[in-house]
Image (tube, helix red, strand yellow):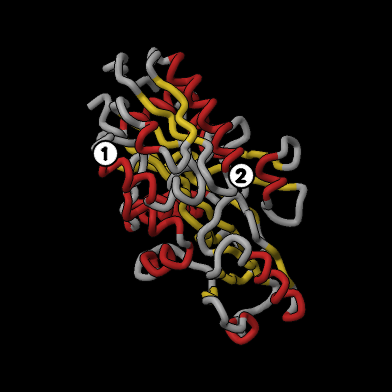
């Protein structure tokens, strides 16, 4: 699958690094995307490591390729800066980024859709987590409500472990999401756009050597097995999962690119979260999903670049 390359002289800022806990992952994504842009002929693409001085650093750039992950990069903050500066940028806008960064608010948006949601409790600061999970069944997954790459996440099996898990999650966010643990396997679906219409990539199934898909499993070679297209779902469940991914992408107002994660149990997918700026490292999910659709890394980068309007 090939895409037209135009406007090769454009000055493109590849935004990466930043000030979140996912800084190192973002730097890896940015480096890879910069290499692809140069191979594609965009010789005026440059890395911009995002700092509080970002508005000065962006002067003179015509477009922004956003490879920031986590706080300030995926939550609508950098998108707002770019809107003010009138610099077209890749991926989701301010509203979709802000909603999808917050796992609880994402679930509220999806509540009245066909997307299967996991039973959960939302714990605000100073609330007792044990009281909030009275209607849930252990084991539970405890998560910072607005964090990525599995930072601050824990699996707990009883009330006694819950307080420590919530304390760990609150190192990242004061608000915490607690969900019932789905004892199944992890799958993820990329959502891309062509001619302004969203479509799902092949489903990527991940079998890990860890108890669940934690940070080490995500970013250490050899700890996870990627199976794409997924083999653990029936044909019907695969189609339903893809439909749910596109529906979630559209319902949350996403644009350009997203990656939607699910747990699968008894051939039924359960929504986990939407990533509005998926990783683009050597071990990231989206490039593997795109490759299974016949889209190599460089053309994936070009597709995402097109969401900034560069080639329209």
User: Which of the 4 quarters of the picture holds residue 205?
Assistant: top right
Q: Give the quarter of the figure containing the C terminus.
A: top left
Q: Position of residue 147 (x, y in %)?
A: 54, 56
Q: CA distance from mark 2 to mark 1?
A: 46 Å
Left or right for 38, reference 250:
right
Up the image or down, 136 lies above or below 49; here it is: below
Left or right for 294, reference 171:
left
Residue that label 1 marks: 85
* Identity of the residue drawn at 49% across and 51% down: 71
Q: Position of residue 268 (x, y in %)?
A: 54, 61
Q: Earlier in the sequence, mark 2 or mark 1?
A: 1
| Residue 231 tag number | 2
Left or right for 175, reference 212:
left
Q: Given contact means CB atoms under 8 Å apart, are the residues at marks 2 and 1 in contact?
A: no
Task: Please tell me whether mark 2 sits on a helix, a strand or a loop.
Answer: loop
* Identity of the residue drawn at 58% across and 37% down: 284
């Amino acid at each position: 699958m090939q895409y037209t390359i135009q406007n090769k002289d454009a000055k493109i800022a590849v935004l990466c690094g930043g000030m979140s806990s996912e800084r190192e992952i973002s730097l890896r994504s940015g480096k890879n995307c910069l290499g692809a842009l140069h191979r594609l002929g965009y010789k005026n693409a440059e890395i911009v490591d995002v700092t509080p001085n970002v508005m000065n650093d962006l002067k003179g750039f015509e477009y922004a390729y956003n490879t920031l992950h986590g706080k300030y990069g995926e939550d609508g903050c950098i998108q707002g800066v770019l809107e003010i500066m009138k610099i077209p940028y890749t991926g989701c806008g301010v509203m979709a980024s802000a909603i999808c960064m917050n796992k609880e608010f994402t679930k509220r948006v999806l509540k009245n859709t066909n997307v299967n949601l996991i039973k959960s409790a939302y714990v605000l600061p100073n609330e007792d987590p044990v009281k909030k999970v009275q209607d849930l069944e252990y084991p539970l997954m405890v998560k910072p409500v607005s964090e990525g790459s599995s930072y601050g996440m824990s699996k707990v099996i009883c009330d006694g472990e819950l307080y420590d898990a919530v304390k760990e999650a609150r190192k990242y966010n004061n608000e915490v999401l607690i969900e019932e643990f789905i004892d199944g396997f992890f799958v993820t679906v990329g959502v891309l756009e062509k001619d302004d219409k969203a479509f799902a990539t092949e489903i990527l199934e991940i079998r890990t050597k860890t108890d669940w898909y934690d940070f080490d499993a995500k970013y250490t070679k050899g700890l996870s097995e990627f199976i794409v297209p997924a083999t653990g779902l029936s044909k019907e469940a695969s189609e339903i999962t893809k439909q749910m991914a596109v529906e979630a992408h559209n319902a949350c107002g996403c644009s350009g690119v997203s990656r939607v994660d699910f747990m699968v149990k008894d051939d039924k997918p359960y929504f986990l979260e939407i990533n509005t700026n998926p990783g683009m490292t050597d071990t990231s999910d989206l490039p593997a999903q795109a490759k299974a659709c016949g889209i190599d890394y460089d053309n994936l980068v070009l597709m995402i670049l097109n969401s900034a309007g560069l080639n329209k």
